[in-house]
Image: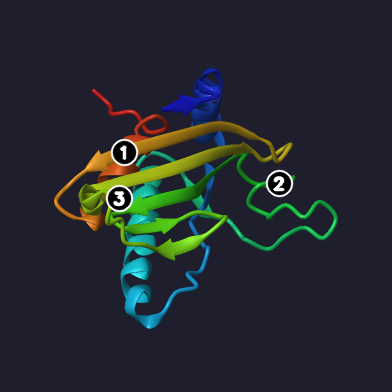
């Protein structure tokens, strides 16, 4: 699922010309020790999958999460220098582990036992000259386990920005 699809061509052209700032998922889990290890493995898996796919096609810089005191936007989202486009991992689901800006939690879905095979990744593409989000992409995958599923979902989402070459 893509919103802002009309901006995809311009974003790809800007990334080909000037590269991209990659803003990995950085929300830290606030969980008990029993869930933290799996959550960190999921964060690592989604960040690697998106970062490696972007780097396979474009010059990538990892963005700083430091916020500008005037605008309160992170440096990766708004900056006068460097690449014009930033790709941020907004949220993910890695089996039963959820990561999103509003809540970071590992939950058990007793009403839907099939969730352990589901992966979802939500990417937002920002225009760094304005800081505005211009494209929102959601990728999904069902795999053997949460880690494989989130990697598959990342591949599905990033395919919009890194189309396969013939």
Give the CA distance from mark 1 to mark 3: 8 Å
Q: Earlier in the sequence, mark 2 or mark 1?
A: 2
Q: Residue at x 50, y 54 (%)?
A: 100
- Which of 21/90 is in front? 90
* Mark 1: secondary structure: strand
In terms of image quadrants, where is residue 75?
Answer: bottom right
Reading the image, the residue beneath label 1 is: 140
Name the colour scheme.
Answer: rainbow
Horizontal and vertical percent position of residue 65: 62, 61
* Mark 2: secondary structure: loop
Q: Residue furthest front?
A: 111
Q: Relative to residue 166, is residue 42 drawn left or right?
A: right
Horizontal and vertical percent position of residue 72: 77, 55
Q: Earlier in the sequence, mark 1 or mark 3?
A: 1
Q: Residue at x 44, y 74 (%)?
A: 31
* Mark 3: secondary structure: helix
Q: Earlier in the sequence, mark 3 or mark 2?
A: 2
Horizontal and vertical percent position of residue 62: 52, 56
Reading the image, the residue beneath label 2 is: 78
Horizontal and vertical percent position of residue 57: 38, 39
Reading the image, the residue beneath label 3 is: 150
Give the CA distance from mark 2 to mark 1: 28 Å
């Amino acid at each position: 699922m893509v919103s802002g699809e009309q901006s995809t061509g311009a974003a790809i052209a800007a990334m080909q010309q000037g590269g991209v700032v990659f803003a990995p998922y950085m929300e830290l889990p606030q969980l008990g020790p029993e869930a933290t290890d799996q959550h960190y493995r999921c964060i690592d898996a989604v960040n690697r999958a998106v970062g490696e796919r972007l780097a396979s096609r474009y010059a990538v810089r990892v963005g700083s999460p430091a916020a500008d005191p005037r605008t309160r936007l992170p440096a990766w989202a708004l900056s006068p220098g460097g690449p014009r486009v930033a790709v941020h991992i907004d949220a993910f689901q890695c089996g039963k582990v959820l990561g999103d800006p509003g809540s970071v939690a590992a939950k058990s879905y007793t009403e839907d036992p099939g969730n352990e095979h589901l992966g979802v990744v939500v990417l937002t593409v920002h225009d760094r000259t304005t800081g505005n989000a211009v494209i929102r992409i959601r990728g999904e995958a069902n795999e053997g386990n949460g880690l494989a599923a989130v990697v598959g979902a990342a591949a599905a989402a990033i395919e919009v920005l890194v189309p396969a070459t013939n």
